[in-house]
Amino acid sequence: MIRFALGKLAEAAIAIWGVVTIVFFVSRVLGDPAVLLLPIGASDAELQALRSSLGLDQPILLQYFTSLGAMLRGDFGMSFQHMRPALDVVLERMPATASLSASALVLGVLIGAIAGTIAALNRGKLAELIVMTAALLGQATPVFWLGLMMILFFSVQLGWLPSSGSGTLLHLVLPAVTLAVFVSASIARLLRSSLLDILGEDYVRTARAKGLLPQTIFTWHVARNALIPVVTMIGIIAGELLGGSVVTETVFAWPGIGRLIVQAIQNQDFPVIQAGVAVVATIFVFINLAIDLLYGVLDPRIRRQR
Amino acid sequence: MTAFFTALAKSRTGLVGFILLAFFVLVAIFAPWLGLPSPIRGDLTARLAPPTWTSLFSPGAHPLGTDEVGRDILSRILYGSRLTLTIAATAVILGGIVGTFLGIVAGFYGGIVDRILMRLVDIQLALPLMLLALLVVAALGPSFSNLVIVLALTSWIRYARIIRGQVLALREREFVQSAHAIGASTMRIMLRHILPNVLTPALVVATLELARIIIMDAALSFLGLGIQPPNPSWGRMLADGRVYISTAWWIVTFPGVTILLTVLSVNLLGDWLRDYFDPKLRTTR
């Protein structure tokens, strides 16, 4: 188990290094930040002076190794726009993104799990049809458009909830529900099919033949095994949530990392883009690391692979 | 082929998806001949006109209303679908070719090639695809070809992973082993014996990817990084309509409904294709 865990940890480290490298090279193509920082009409000499003070005139590989070393120490440079360390700017936004993603994930998994179970236990009945139709629609709906429709209905028409901003718990409701719809649709579809697979297994028939109560069979033989693919799915969904939060945060003006990155791209604020993407990717890598390890505990066969 | 269509006709959901998608594609192709108002030049006397229907069978001049400069929403949606569907289809094909090729190479050669390619896949999977797409479009600029490249870039990994798994199993099969034994070249084995056997899983992945790419394309243009105005794009229409959400609900409603129906039709068809060809692929998503 320790070898397995160390292997996974090494993989995670390589993944983070790869991401930081991609981000560095892509964001250096974006444009010349020196041009943006100076007022229009600045002289070439001023431009050169700013470039060298930012280190932008050095060979790209040298810049890469310098910034790679700095990034490992958590130093992503000063935000061009905010004139403060980029990592600070990003980490400030962390609570907003974390609370939004976490509430969407909890809400989505809860609704998805209940709906998926109802669908699987009511095979061929109306309940299954309703759940599955809703899930199909939920998966086909673009998150940002759903957000707009929520605003149109609950803020503009009914006036119940604020359409944008943050601060109170009421502000969290619309963005969290919007993101949760997508999560619950995927979870419901996956859990249903994984429950159906397991309900057809021999050991479930054996448990029935032994005369165990249906509740006992469901809790101890079916649900536990059906949850394994769902745990994996949560890793994938965490990525979708972090990506989806970019558009959702933009729709609802939610002050999280996603919106910050979009604004940084518009302002060509490299240090913030790098810090933001690196932070998001690191969170994502660690979530998946945790899931891999959990998986290794749940299912001993996986530890021995490779 | 006949068996395929008989099976399709028998499945309710697959058939609905197929007909809907065929309808959207045909309408996109024939949009210029449908007698629609210009999607780019607006009628300033009819700004923010609501959808007008005198009865169910006689729509008014603007069946889905107009936007803030009097452009017909229906016309913009249909012309927008031409670009969106072309971008998405090209990206799916490009990503499919690259991903299938790399998946075959990784699975067939194994060893160091396989390990490098799969590590590359892992690294890319560690970066949420939406962020990667945002980053690259912002760097390269939002042109047609750049969008295709970016969307294909987010897509190749899905093919590569699944195809690699298939090839690992195929490699040990007797017909491949015997091709080796009679001295067939590696190239010949990959092209004549492996490739035909991974085309169906590739097709299934392609359908599911098409749906994902349509949504991602719309999201990028919603953030202002898609096809640029004055060309109509669904995501951009939604972004522009946000300002008028309290007075003109139709601007933000209909483009979204179109995205939903398009993605739904592709998903329905894709789910059916997957179950038809290989139910075991179900866990791949």
Image (cartoon, rainbow, N blue to C red):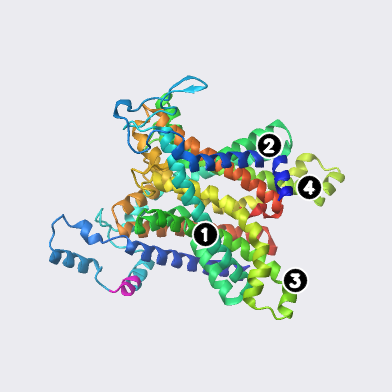
CA gap, disc 2 and disc 1: 37 Å
CA gap, disc 3 and disc 2: 46 Å
Q: Which mark is residue A8?
A: none
The residue wearing badge 3 is B175
The residue wearing badge 1 is B95
Q: Over which residues does the magenta segment extend?
A: A59-64
* Figure quadrant of residue B175: bottom right
- The answer to whether residue B98 is seen in the rendering is yes
- Toward the viewer: A224 or B33? B33
Q: Judging from the image, what secondary structure is the residue with disc 3 in?
A: helix
The reply to whether callout 3 and callout 2 are in contact (CB within 8 Å) is no
Q: Main secondary structure of the magenta part?
A: helix
- Same-chain check, marks 4 and 1: no
- Toward the viewer: A4 or B2? B2
Q: Is residue B96 above or below residue B267?
A: below
The residue wearing badge 4 is A200
* Figure quadrant of residue A119: top right
Q: Is residue B149 above or below residue B266?
A: below
Mark toward the viewer: 4 or 1: 1
Q: In the visual, does A224 lie left or right of B33?
A: right
Residue type at mark 1 is Gly
- Toward the viewer: A116 or A4? A116
The residue wearing badge 2 is A118
Return the chain for callout 1: B
Q: Position of residue A199 (x, y in %)?
A: 76, 46
